[in-house]
Amino acid sequence: MKKSYDIAVRINEIITPWADLAPESKLGGFTLNEFKTAVAASLDKRQEIKALKAGISAAVAERSAADTTSLKSIRRVVAGVIADPSLGSDSPLYRAMKYVTDSERASAQSKQTPAAVAGAAAASSPSTK
């Protein structure tokens, strides 16, 4: 079976020479106009899909622009939580927003053993061979 995009090409490869060389002939029980009517749904759906794809591309671009605005708004709100003296970066609200609080960060650093810190430092430094 041919791929769907080949069918549109094939339809035109049938219509064009038929219209040019034998427009009055009835072929396979079809007049040229009857054949065009019979294959119109295939061509129309391809045009519809093309338009829908263009619409999707436009919607994706619009979503990207909206996401940029949303991320800026998120940053403003989080900065507001951090800057608010009654909340801050160690507050339950900050934690509920899925950020690591200052207490959690300090606790994680204090739990590291000197050997673990040395191992991490050695792993991140470039080796000389």
Image (spheres, helix red, strand yellow):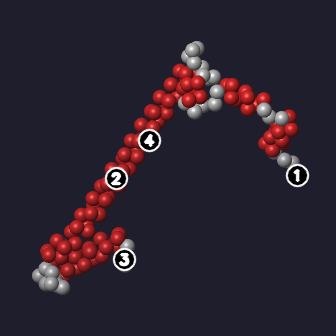
**Could you tell which of marks 4 and 3 lies nearer the N-terminus?**
3
At label 2, the amino acid type is Ala
Q: Residues within 10 Å of mark 4 (few under 14, many from 20)?
A: few
Measure how far apart labels 1 and 3 are at the Cα level.
58 Å
Task: Decide if residue 64 is on the left or right side of residue 120.
Answer: left
Q: Which mark is residue 129?
A: 1
On the image, numbered disc 3 is attached to which residue? 2
Is residue 23 at least partly visible in the picture? no
The relative height of residue 84 versus residue 61 in the rendered view (above or below) is above
On the image, numbered disc 4 is attached to which residue? 64
At label 1, the amino acid type is Lys
**Could you tell which of marks 2 and 1 lies nearer the N-terminus?**
2
The relative height of residue 40 versus residue 103 in the rendered view (above or below) is below
**At which x and y percent is residue 90?**
63, 22
At label 4, the amino acid type is Ser
Q: Residues within 10 Å of mark 3 (few under 14, many from 20)?
A: few
**Element under disc 3:** loop
Q: Residues within 10 Å of mark 2 (few under 14, many from 20)?
A: few
Measure how far apart labels 4 and 3 are at the Cα level.
36 Å
Q: Which mark is residue 28?
A: none
**Element under disc 2:** helix
**Could you tell which of marks 2 and 4 lies nearer the N-terminus?**
2
On the image, numbered disc 2 is attached to which residue? 54
Q: Quadrant of residue 82?
A: top right
**Element under disc 1:** loop
